[in-house]
């Protein structure tokens, strides 16, 4: 069994600082590359791919918290799940903004046609829309207000992650190596939530 380690408020603070730095690094890198003409021949595609990739990474890291908590018995890991989830939403917003602004120039009719015509955009748009209520209800006040419905709502993250991988898979068309890696990682994370793989834990523990 893993060690039950309690963190001090100071330790929690510094872990959050490190997580902030880790999560903001891709954004800072994009700004640096933009200022130094390092985004390549197709800057819009570079930004779109980068923000989409880090959205997926954020979702998978968020989903990994519960299995790691169960395997290690380190309940304090749950303290950082919300932060990881919000950063996933942050990069999803950047990804979506890049599309509607730099790619489509806020052409509403063009965006609607694109969403309806191209399946990979349809599933990506759906995933982003589903992320919004999760981000909006991620605070303690909404958890108390929604009670049991909060957990039901936040189980949408499983569907969102599946749609995110599918969005990436359909986008690349030929070389599916990276989406396949994300798909395998997601499959493992979802498998740990099946009854026969789930370790016994307190019924009060969150399972997002």
Image: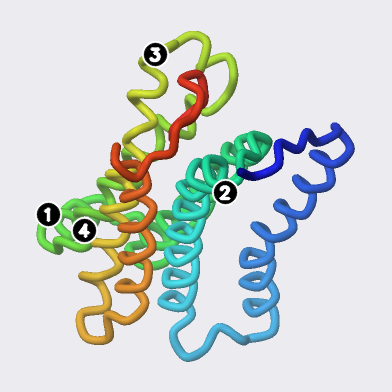
For the residues marked 2 and 1, what is the alpha-carbon distance in whole angstroms? 28 Å
Q: Are marks 4 and 3 in contact (CB under 8 Å)?
A: no
For the residues marked 1 and 3, what is the alpha-carbon distance in whole angstroms? 34 Å
Measuring from the top left, give residue 170's x and y in whole percent: 21, 70
Q: Earlier in the sequence, mark 3 or mark 2?
A: 2
Q: Which mark is residue 87?
A: 2
Point out the frontmost of discs 2 and 4: 2
* Quarter assignment of residue 56: bottom left
In the picture, the quarter occupied by the C terminus is top left
What kind of element bears circle 3? helix
In the picture, the quarter occupied by the N terminus is top right
Check disc 4 and report the residue beneath it. 110
The crowd level at tag 1 (other Cα within 10 Å; few <14, some 14-19, many 20+) is: few
Q: Are marks 4 and 1 in contact (CB under 8 Å)?
A: no
Measuring from the top left, give residue 191's x and y in whole percent: 31, 50
Residue at image coords 25%, 72%: 171
> From the viewer's perspective, is residue 150 above or below residue 104?
above
The crowd level at tag 4 (other Cα within 10 Å; few <14, some 14-19, many 20+) is: few
């Amino acid at each position: 069994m893993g060690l039950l380690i309690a963190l001090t408020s100071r330790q929690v603070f510094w872990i959050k600082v490190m997580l902030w730095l880790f999560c903001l690094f891709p954004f800072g890198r994009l700004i640096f590359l933009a200022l130094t003409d390092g985004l390549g021949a197709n800057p819009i595609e570079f930004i779109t791919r980068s923000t989409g990739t880090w959205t997926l990474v954020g979702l998978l890291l968020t989903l990994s918290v519960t299995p790691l908590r169960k395997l290690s018995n380190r309940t304090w890991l749950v303290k950082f799940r919300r932060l990881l989830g919000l950063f996933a939403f942050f990069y999803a917003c950047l990804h979506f903004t890049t599309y509607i602004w730099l790619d489509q120039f806020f052409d509403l009719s063009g965006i609607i046609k694109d969403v309806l015509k191209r399946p990979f955009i349809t599933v990506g748009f759906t995933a982003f829309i589903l992320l919004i209520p999760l981000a909006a209800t991620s605070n303690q006040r909404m958890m108390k207000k929604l009670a049991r419905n909060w957990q039901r709502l936040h189980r949408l993250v499983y569907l969102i992650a599946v749609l995110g991988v599918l969005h990436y898979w359909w986008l690349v068309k030929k070389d599916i190596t990276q989406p396949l890696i994300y798909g395998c990682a997601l499959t493992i994370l979802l498998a740990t939530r099946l009854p026969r793989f789930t370790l016994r834990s307190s019924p009060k523990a969150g399972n997002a």
